[in-house]
Image (cartoon, helix red, strand yellow):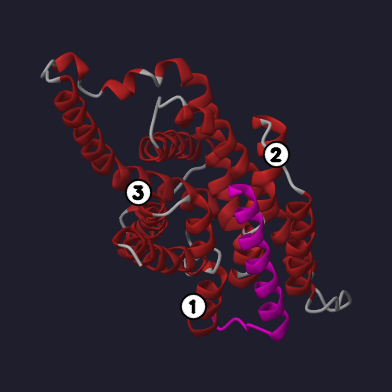
Amino acid sequence: MDNNTKKGLITGCIGIIFVGLQPIVALSRPSVIDAYLSGAMTCLVEAMIFFPIMLFELRAMNLNKQKMENQTNENNRFHFLINWKKNLLLLIFIGLLFSINQVLFFVGYDLAGAINGSLTQKTSVFFGIILGYLILKERITKIQIIFSLVLFFGLTISITQFFTLLDISSIILIGVGIILLITFLWMVGHTLTKPIFIRNEATPIQMVFIRNFISGVILISTYFIFFTPDLNLFIEPANLLFFLTMGAVYGSGLVCWYKTLSYLDISKATTVFASTPIASAIFATFILGEVFSIAHLVGTILIIVSIVIIVNQKRE
């Protein structure tokens, strides 16, 4: 095993823990904090986390460019930021899209629960190939279609507990529907920003910062416009701890994802992160008291196998 693979597996395993913790932290928030404020503060804390990372990345990129061109022209500093101007409308739309999604993230998990929600989010690989085909004209194979059906079959087994439809809660189904919606919208956002990466107009780190900054500004400003919040919500120690923890867990998961991508190709990185529902299930069982059933186990296995086959087909 080469050094990059080892580093990729290590950062991937750390990322699995952070991503697995996301629904647990979301469901453990103080009852006085609603989904809207949770989404706003999560975005703002994420932006704070990614801002110094982005500056460090830009500095490294500029130093590398100066070495390659053998010059120290200050006009070239932060040159990647210049290209954001022509994508301004797209960036605002992406920020708005992710702001809506961040609020729905908390609503969906409140209704569906940590285990069902984390399994539902794994449909992102299905929406990714569909949107890649419709927007980016990427190829879809028959194998991908077949195992997309297997993925949804596994999800259905998990949600319905082997098709016991009479016992399934309508609240859980509504929550699953919301998470399916946000997963689709997330992939719409990622698909629309992919051409920006292809044109080298921004990096993923820069995009995460700008989308969270815009989303945070949109959410916190509209929160004060449409609601009359108690300002003590922002200084209560328990609430502050939640805001910082949620943003840090969410942001750390993204950092680990991009670090894993820097060491492994997309298919291998996706395969590593496919097991995040297992981490969520373990945390949900011991921290939230949720029950990880045999149906969840069977569904999880089908979902993970489907993801591995789908992403490897995409690579080929």
Circle count: 3
Q: Nearer the viewer, residue 71 or 56?
A: 71
Between circles 3 and 2, the one closer to the viewer is 2
Q: Position of residue 253 (x, y in %)?
A: 41, 58
Of mark 2 and mark 1, the one earlier in the sequence is: 2
Q: Which residue is mark 3?
A: 45
The label on residue 283 is: 1
Q: Which residues are magenta?
A: 288-316
In this view of the protein, can residue 230 be seen by the observer?
A: no
Q: Position of residue 129 (x, y in %)?
A: 67, 45
Label 1, residues with CA under 10 Å away: few <14, some 14-19, many ≥20: many
The amino acid pointed to by label 3 is: Val
The label on residue 219 is: none
Q: Is residue 77 above or below residue 277?
A: above
84 in the magenta segment: no
Q: Which residue is mark 2?
A: 139
Q: Position of residue 224 (x, y in %)?
A: 46, 38
Label 3, residues with CA under 10 Å away: few <14, some 14-19, many ≥20: many
The amino acid pointed to by label 2 is: Arg
> Which residue lies at the image location 45% right of the left edge and 31% below the top edge?
197
**Residue 217 position by quadrant:** top left
> Which residue lies at the image location 69% right of the left edge and 53% below the top edge?
180
Q: Is residue 212 left or right of residue 76?
A: right
Label 2, residues with CA under 10 Å away: few <14, some 14-19, many ≥20: few
Q: Is residue 109 above or below residue 226?
A: below
Q: Nearer the viewer, residue 134 or 71?
A: 71
Q: Are marks 3 and 1 in contact (CB under 8 Å)?
A: no
> Which residue lies at the image location 45% right of the left edge and 34% below the top edge?
221
